[in-house]
Image (cartoon, rainbow, N blue to C red):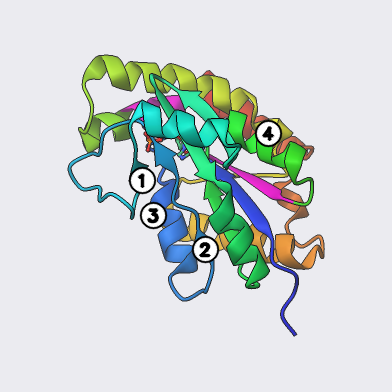
Amino acid sequence: MNSKPIILIVSAPSGCGKGTILHEAFRDKDVFVSVSCTTRGPRENETDGVHYHFWTEEKFNRLVKKNGFLEHAGFTDNQYGTPEQPVLDNLAEGRDVILEIETNGAFQVKEKRPDAVSVFILPPSIGELRRRLYKRGTEPPEKIEKRVSRAAGEIALSPKYDFVMMNDDLDDAVRDFLTIYNAAKTDDGSADCFRPCNEEITNMINEVLENA
Ligand code: 5GP
């Protein structure tokens, strides 16, 4: 028998490889990865309705007024939000729901849905994160620096998540992520080594923040 569907919140500073980990981890699984709405413009490789729903401020604010978002938050100069109806529909159909959202949104979801499970993915260091964002090359330096300083603030909040892991090597990260996902579904304690109360995880978070 299938277990009860869960909401899995995944936060990671942008450039952390979150998208690649999720793609690898869920390639053969019937989960619903929520498509967020945003007021930012699409990047070169992004498609409307696939990566995001790219909306105007007016359209976004209309759904805010209608209470149609499970959560929404400002990030750098744009708004981002999770439309609630598809989340409810997929849960009702028995599918796990994956939310790739930043910290403010993550805490809103935990407030509304205490049964949601949250995972924070750390970059190996802030310096490495900066390098990855420059390598991706989708934004000018001043925007990248804004994201990097925002990332440090988000990493400092990672101890509030249920689980914290690092993306250093992709294969290891996918394996760790799946361990956490399976433990979140079964609640069997098999991912307790990723709980932020562990000294090893606390040290890892501190090291990432120190290597800026
Ligand atoms: P990006 O502009 O790099 O695609 O995303 C910027 C940040 O917004 C990332 O941390 C991403 O996880 C977050 N984000 C994407 N969609 C949502 C959403 O629906 N709600 C919230 N709160 N954050 C989101």
- Residue 174: within the magenta? no
Residue 122 visible in the current orientation: no
Badge 1 or badge 2: first in the primary sequence? 2
The answer to whether mark 4 and mark 2 are in CB contact below 8 A is no
Q: Which residue is mark 4?
A: 107
The residues colored magenta run 116-130
| Camera-nearest label, 3 or 4 | 4
Residue that label 1 marks: 53
Asked if labels 3 and 1 touch by Cβ distance under 8 angstroms, the answer is no
- The answer to whether residue 25 shows anywhere in this view is yes
Residue 91: image location, x then y, percent = 65, 64
Give the number of the mark in front: 1 or 3.
Answer: 1
CA gap, disc 1 to disc 2?
15 Å
- Residue 200 higher or lower than 126, as above or below: below
Label 3, label 2: how many angstroms apart (C-alpha)?
16 Å
Residue that label 2 marks: 32
Mark 3: which secondary structure?
helix
Per the image, label 1 sits on a secondary structure element best described as strand
Spatial separation of the CA atoms under disc 4 and disc 2: 20 Å
The kind of residue on which mark 4 rests is Phe
The kind of residue tagged 3 is Thr
Residue at left offset 51%, top offset 74%:
29
